[in-house]
Image (cartoon, grey):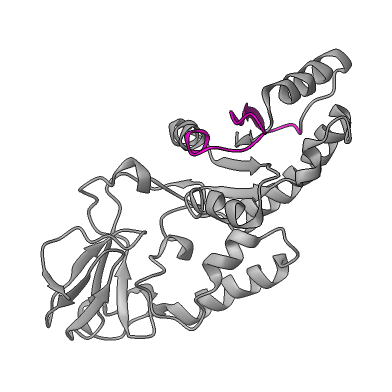
């Protein structure tokens, strides 16, 4: 059962919503666990400590997590707050005017959240990774493609671009899921980028990632999962990573995780 964390209401508001729901028998959408995390700021502002607490709560979950956040802080601050969660977890902003309860009333709040949860169910069915073969787990910084907006479209799903996101994911699959006829991967199919580099997701899993990189798009990454990255024809290449770049020699390969962090020793390119 997915978990929706409603993040940013002050405690009095969330208590009123829960009490109203209990009194009238109004419930959030069936099939979801709902949890409230409060903003601790005196002026309803979300603080860094609140973000850390929300991330810790989400990372402890065993089910897919959706963060539904709300604040009346400015646009620049909101962007910074969102970056703390994206692309680790599915993240949506609730309308800031909902902070002015009783408009909407607690019943209206629950009803509107339920409408959004229907959208989130669509995202789970059509976009969220189902296993470690999903293209959204590929390291965006490393994978060379002209279709490099799939990660952004997956993040913004629900903002009026749903059909475009689904079409883009299909186009990405048609372009980059390739069957190879020769070389190390002859007669096998893998994600292959525009530089003809293969991201093999089927190798042995080892060297578990830190907790900060254990989730992506609300999918819990299997412990030790990484890609064996090599050129389809065994040629040397430079792999761009999240922190450094690495030179991979002829017939060589490098281990890289879904966030672009390398897991092997190799020559670092300045």
Magenta stretch: includes residue 213:
no
Residue visible at 20% across and 58% down in the picture: 263
In the displayed structure, would residue 50 be above or below residue 121? above
Residue visible at 69% across and 32% down in the picture: 9
- Image quadrant holding the N terminus, namely top right
| Residue 254, position as x, y percentages in the image | 19, 68
Q: Quadrant of residue 260?
A: bottom left
For this view, does 232 lie left or right of residue 113?
Answer: left
Residue visible at 84% across and 23% down in the picture: 26
Residue 188 or residue 128, whichever sits in front: 128
Please, what is the dominant secondary structure of the magenta stretch?
A: loop
| Residue 6, position as x, y percentages in the image | 65, 35
In this rendering, the count of numbered labels is 0
- Residue interval drawn in magenta: 29-51
- Image quadrant holding the C terminus, namely bottom left
Residue at the outermost front position: 42
């Amino acid at each position: 059962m997915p978990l929706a964390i409603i993040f940013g209401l002050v405690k009095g508001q969330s208590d009123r919503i829960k009490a109203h729901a209990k009194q009238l028998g109004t419930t959030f959408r069936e099939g979801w666990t709902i949890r409230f995390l409060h903003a601790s700021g005196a002026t309803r502002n979300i603080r860094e400590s609140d973000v850390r607490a929300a991330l810790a709560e989400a990372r402890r979950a065993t089910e897919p997590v959706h963060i539904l956040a709300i604040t009346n802080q400015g646009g620049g601050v909101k962007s910074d707050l969102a970056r703390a969660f994206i692309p680790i977890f599915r993240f949506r902003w609730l309308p800031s005017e909902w902070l002015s309860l009783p408009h909407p009333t607690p019943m209206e709040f629950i009803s509107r959240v339920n409408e959004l949860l229907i959208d989130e169910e669509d995202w789970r069915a059509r976009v969220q990774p189902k296993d470690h073969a999903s293209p959204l787990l590929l390291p965006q910084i490393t994978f060379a493609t002209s279709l490099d907006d799939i990660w952004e479209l997956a993040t913004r799903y629900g903002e009026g671009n749903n059909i475009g996101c689904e079409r883009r994911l299909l186009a990405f699959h048609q372009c980059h899921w390739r069957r190879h006829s020769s070389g190390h991967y002859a007669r096998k199919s893998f994600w292959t980028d525009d530089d003809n580099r293969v991201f093999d997701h089927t190798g042995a899993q080892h060297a578990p990632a830190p907790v900060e990189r254990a989730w992506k798009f609300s999918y819990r990454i299997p412990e030790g999962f990484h890609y064996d990255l090599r050129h389809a024809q065994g040629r040397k290449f430079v792999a761009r990573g999240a922190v450094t770049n690495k030179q991979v020699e002829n017939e060589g390969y490098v281990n890289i995780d879904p966030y672009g962090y390398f897991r092997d020793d190799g020559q670092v390119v300045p």
